[in-house]
Image (tube, rainbow, N blue to C red):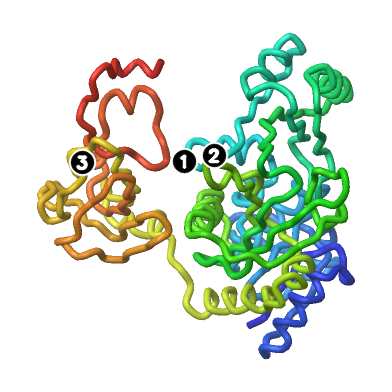
Amino acid sequence: MKLAILSRSLRAYSTRRFKEAALNRGHEAKVLDTLKFAIDLERGTPDLYFRQKHLSHYDAVLPRIGASITYFGTAVVRQFQEMDVFCANTAHGILNSRDKLRSLQILSRHNIGIPRTTFVRDKNDVLPAIERVGGAPVVIKLIEGTQGIGVLLAETVKQAESIVELLQSQKQNVLIQKFVAESRGKDIRAFVVGDQVVAAMRRVAQGQEFRSNVHRGGIAEPVDLDESYIETAIRCTQIMGLRVAGVDMLESKEGPQVMEVNSSPGLEGIETATGLDVAGAVIDYIAAQVDFPEIDVRQRLTVSRGYGVSELYVPEGSKFVGTAIRDTDLWEKDINVLTLYRGAKIIPNPHSTRVLEANDKILCYGKLEAMRDMIPAKTRRRRIPKIQELDTQELPGDTGTGD
């Protein structure tokens, strides 16, 4: 495999470890400065130049896109994708995770535990927003920031109001977030590769510092994760559209609370704390994808007009809960179940006797009109989600207004 590592720093620990892991496995690996690319666009022939020379062929790309070059960096990654080069993380996934507000909006929609958060622009909305997240103390975050930069703790409402007003006066967009007191000064970092958590650590802040980032002096220690944390980390990574990610979670009384999904997670802290070859796990995953690539059935299986692929969600109260796949009316409607997703489990080509449970997702291929008709009218009026909901029985008091 010939691997391109997109990075602005040849000497960074993570960059060196990825290259070292690739070379040790017999692969060819080169570190390419992301800002040295030129993107050429012409009908039918997307192309790339590097340092004024036509870029040679690469089998895969491992993007390490820093926050300061997000726009250009994701444009380069997108160009590799258009050239059919496997990218460990896609441009879409990187953009989803880089914006804290955007990522929390997506995770909230998919029922992932997150600290209660609010985003306001009008100064008159600041005090009501603080009250809605539970009052002081609150955490105030810049929408774009890494390594704990732009994260502040306001102990009082007055402090919070002053900080928000100051940041807004500097044209900064900020989030106001509930402070999870029981997790003060510590968090969990789960390193996800594909559909596995390959390493995990607990980061503990030192002294009066409430931010646990290793770059801020935090101490990292290995941790064995509960299944709920493993499942949450994997689901977050997949929801964001990433394959390699660091998922940061708080340990709250209600279970895992996701703070951030990082598309370019550092290796030094987690490899030092756990003693695991995390870089090697990433390289092995990329090599496996190059040898046996996944096909995006949403794009490939549209062979006949009116047919396609869709993910259907089985919510609580659905008439499909407790029903075997063969006893549903899916086959009669010319709909075939390709994959069943149950929590962190993926069940390809599920047997017809498999009984559906609440919160299952099924990837189906068939008539798009038939699948569309299975969505309740009230759901269609309210929104058109990525994962459509299968018909549910009307619940008492449900007016369907969305209020």
Picture residue at 66% right of the left edge, 88% below the top:
25
Quickly name the residue at label 2: 106
Please state the horizontal and vertical placement of residue 344, each as a whole percent of the image.
Answer: 43, 58
Give the CA separation, mark 1 to mark 3.
Answer: 24 Å
Position of residue 366 in the picture relative to residue 242 (left or right): left
The residue beneath circle 3 is 370
What's the residue type where badge 2 is placed? Answer: Ile
C-alpha gap between disc 1 and disc 2: 7 Å
Mark linked to residue 147: none
In the image shown, does 69 or 398 lie closer to the viewer? 398
Where residue 70 appears, x then y in whole percent? 76, 48
Callout 1 touching callout 2 (CB < 8 Å): yes
Name which of mark 1 and mark 3 comes first in the sequence.
Answer: 1
Q: Secondary structure at mark 3?
A: helix
Tell me the mark number nearer the camera, choosing from 1 and 3: 1
- Residue 5, compared with residue 343, is above or below; it is below
